[in-house]
Image (cartoon, coloured by chain):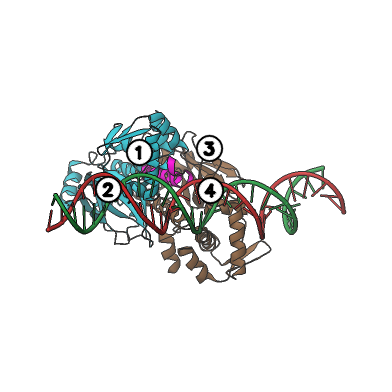
Chain colours: A cyan, B brown, C green, D red
Amino acid sequence: MTEEQASAQHSCAIGNNLISCMEILTPDESSLLESKMVEVNYRKGEIICKQGAPATQIMFVREGLVKIYMESNSGENLVLHIMPEMNIIGLSTLFEGNNVYQFSAQAYIDTRIQVVDMQTFRQLIRTNPEFSLKIIALLAEYNTIISGRFFCLTQKQTYGRLADVLLCLANRIYKQRKFPLSLSRKELAEIAGMSVESVARILTRFREENLIEMECKHLHIVDYDRLFDISLKG
Amino acid sequence: MTEEQASAQHSCAIGNNLISCMEILTPDESSLLESKMVEVNYRKGEIICKQGAPATQIMFVREGLVKIYMESNSGENLVLHIMPEMNIIGLSTLFEGNNVYQFSAQAYIDTRIQVVDMQTFRQLIRTNPEFSLKIIALLAEYNTIISGRFFCLTQKQTYGRLADVLLCLANRIYKQRKFPLSLSRKELAEIAGMSVESVARILTRFREENLIEMECKHLHIVDYDRLFDISLKG
DNA sequence: AAGAATCCTTGATGCAGATCAAGTTTTTTT
DNA sequence: AAAAAAACTTGATCTGCATCAAGGATTCTT
């Protein structure tokens, strides 16, 4: 319950409802999609799509973890969204007059993607109203996630933001309070929108205050409630 | 052309394509909508919808200018989006499991709104695929606008952000380089995500540098190109 | 196992921009 | 037209966090 409250207003980059839109398709539509769809496997760190490139495809994340981000000329990336399986990359390029991706996507871990061309995708929306409603729901959720993240990164300060990220990893990805910390300090820093040094300092502080424990690459959230407090306005 | 480039990456809060989804409806659908729709007039400063309230309605902005924002407990508001006529408030609440608005909306100037209940709106999406595609396009554009704003507020510094806002007002709202500055310093500060004092200081600076002129409540962008440069990375 | 490279930690310094303060101008009220 | 309130400007100070710097711990290379 408290977790839900947090997710609404002070969200990290990951949604919590897995929206399944494939099951809705009719057999005909399914086989159309099957025939047009191509599967691509990406290794950890590989680029899935590039900001500024022609937007010709919609990509279904079937397995893995993907970072959606905007690149700036200064080299600082802004992480917009983190997508586990069951998400769709490229929906936000569907508005008229647009023909390029406004973001890049990169695989955090080995990732399996299914690719369809936009025409086919648009076709499905046109022929299946329920599918179309699902897509609207997904876009609406993405909107809310990005807004929550926007709020978080502009209104909270470093301690709160990092607490947010840790809670997000525990709740949304690993679904337990002790989990392998596979992200480097650099990746954590990027997600939380701060410097690597700040991440190190704050993690040390959290350890000193007995909010978390870290042993052999695993992070354990010891005092969930206090960490949650910090995440609300740290 | 340069303006377009700017809008893609370094957007202010306002979109530039007016997407008309009403014209797409069949006569039957139109009359259904007519029968269900209620018109409400808001005066400058009045609240149109409130963050946390039950999300039961979709609102069409027919006339005026609306601020979409998130409220924080500290009293600082985060402006997500600014909507002139032809926009729809509440689309991002359409995802499953959601039942409240995650944002508030307030009228910047006198504003005319048409209100429909969600059921009727969902019905239209189900019966009219072209309408549904328009809604998807609109949501996709909102996504892009918020992402651009997110980028702008986190990556640029004050001078660039304020330049952005001024260019946005000139290009998107008034569509000329000399326009009445109806927004107060406080409102500008809120949109650009900075303090009122910073706005005053920067405007003075812009005037000293002959980038803008201000006389009797009107702002005139004198050196568009240099202001544009500043907006790119100020 | 030694060396190189990367990652992590911790302290010292610098800076953009918020906050505080105080005066000036404009608008609103009466 | 006078008084009060709100909006605006400008300078002085404060602060959160980035950046710089340098040593320690891991991991990768050979």
Q: Chain of mark 2?
A: A
Camera-side residue of A180 and B193: A180
Dot 2: element: strand
What amino acid is labelled 3 in the image? Asn
Which residue was labeled with disc 4?
B67
Q: Which mark is residue B78?
A: none
Label 4, residues with CA under 10 Å away: few <14, some 14-19, many ≥20: many
**Residue A166: assigned label:** 1
Q: Chain ID for label 4?
A: B
Q: Secondary structure at mark 1?
A: helix
Picture residue at 41% right of the left edge, 35% below the top: A6
Q: Nearer the viewer, residue C1 or B120?
A: C1
Q: Which mark is residue A66?
A: 2
Q: Which residues are magenta?
A: A139-159
Give the side of residue B135 with respect to residue B39, left or right.
left
Q: CA distance from mark 4 to mark 2?
A: 32 Å
* Sequence order check, earlier mark of 4 and 3: 4
Spatial separation of the CA atoms under disc 2 and disc 1: 17 Å
**Numbered badge on residue B73:** 3
Residue type highlighted by circle 2: Val
- Dot 3 lies on which element? loop
Mark 4 and mark 3: Cα distance apart in space: 18 Å
In the rendering, at what x and y percent does residue B118 appear?
Answer: 43, 37
Magenta-drawn stretch contains A155: yes
Mark 1 and mark 4 residues within 8 Å of each other at the beta carbon: no
Amino acid carrying label 4: it is Lys
